[in-house]
Image: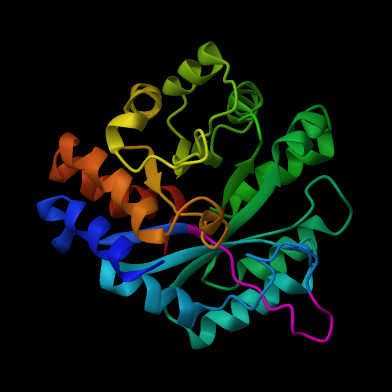
Amino acid sequence: MDRRTFLGTAAALPAFAGGQRILDTHTHFYDPSRAQGVPWPPKDNQTLYRTVLPPEFQKLTAPLGVEGTIVVEASPWLEDNQWILDLAQDHPVIRGFVGHLDPGRPGFAANLERFRKHRLFLGIRLGGAVLAKELGNPAFLEDMKRLAGANLELDVLGGRAPFADTARLSDRVPGLRIVLNHLPNDAPKDGVALAALNSRPNVYAKVSGVLRRVDERVPVDAAFYRESLDELWAAFGEDRLVYASNWPVSDLIAPYPQILGVVQSYFAARGPAAADKFFWKNAQTAYRIPS
């Protein structure tokens, strides 16, 4: 990002943004230079395949008012859960971690017991395809109950957001907090299933998939995205939407200040109280972030 882009984006931010507390609930940290390497991202991705660690994130986002982040798993390797938790010990900008475990499989209960002891271990993430496949598995549902019983949450990732499956899981394990990733997502949606989530108070939407490429450009005017954001507002309201960037993956679409600036402009129109919930307070409720 060049200086002109940064200044242009900063100038477009709403007036109250300077005093807004911001917690980014979705970032990834990894280091391909480790002896074991990394399972993701792929080596042929020239933008993402590099060392990405907290100091870079802090340098990029602190001038924008971002106070901390929740890291989300980027690896299926069990010990990479510990790698992130160890990283957090030296970098207080990490306010929590959503890890990777395999519910419905042997060893889940023991692994959950191991990692839940760390105050920053807030939950786990599953792919939408896994959720759809495992919903009929009694062992999977028992492990979801274990997760809820430990006061931990579940992030759900899906290309086409798995609204109906999320609703089913919420009904079967009503005490489980669920955070849907990367919405509004420009893939086709099941509007009826999305609207049904309005009555599931423990289901939250992570707004980290707003900007998109259209005709070789990425619009940065919040008005362009108002319809899809209004759809989320109607389904989840001001109490169940949380801010996230998906950095550094977001760099594939736009620089961080533009990712942040679009949603800041949208929530400026909703008022400071709604913005405070979106950028800070709702994340505290969804993730139970420790003080």
- Position of 220 with respect to 26 (left or right) is left
Examine the rendered structure and indicate whether residue 285 appears above or below residue 178: below
Q: Residue at x 17, y 42 (%)?
A: 268
Task: Give the quarter of the image for residue 117.
Answer: bottom right
Task: Give the quarter of the image for residue 165.
Answer: top right
Examine the rendered structure and indicate whether residue 136 appears above or below residue 262: above
Magenta segment includes 34 = yes
Q: What is the span of residues highlighted in magenta in the rendered image?
A: 26-37
Could you tell me residue 25's position as x and y percent?
A: 45, 56
Q: How many marks?
A: 0
Q: Residue at x 67, y 69 (%)?
A: 115
Magenta stretch, overall SS: loop
Could you tell me residue 274's position as x and y percent?
A: 21, 40
Q: Which quarter of the image is occupied by the N terminus?
A: bottom left
Could you tell me residue 82's position as x and y percent?
A: 69, 76
Q: Residue at x 46, y 38 (%)?
A: 205
| Residue 8 visible here | yes
Residue sitting farthest toward the top: 192
Residue sitting farthest toward the left: 15
Q: Nearer the viewer, residue 263 or 124?
A: 263
Q: Nearer the viewer, residue 282 or 176?
A: 282
Magenta segment includes 33 = yes
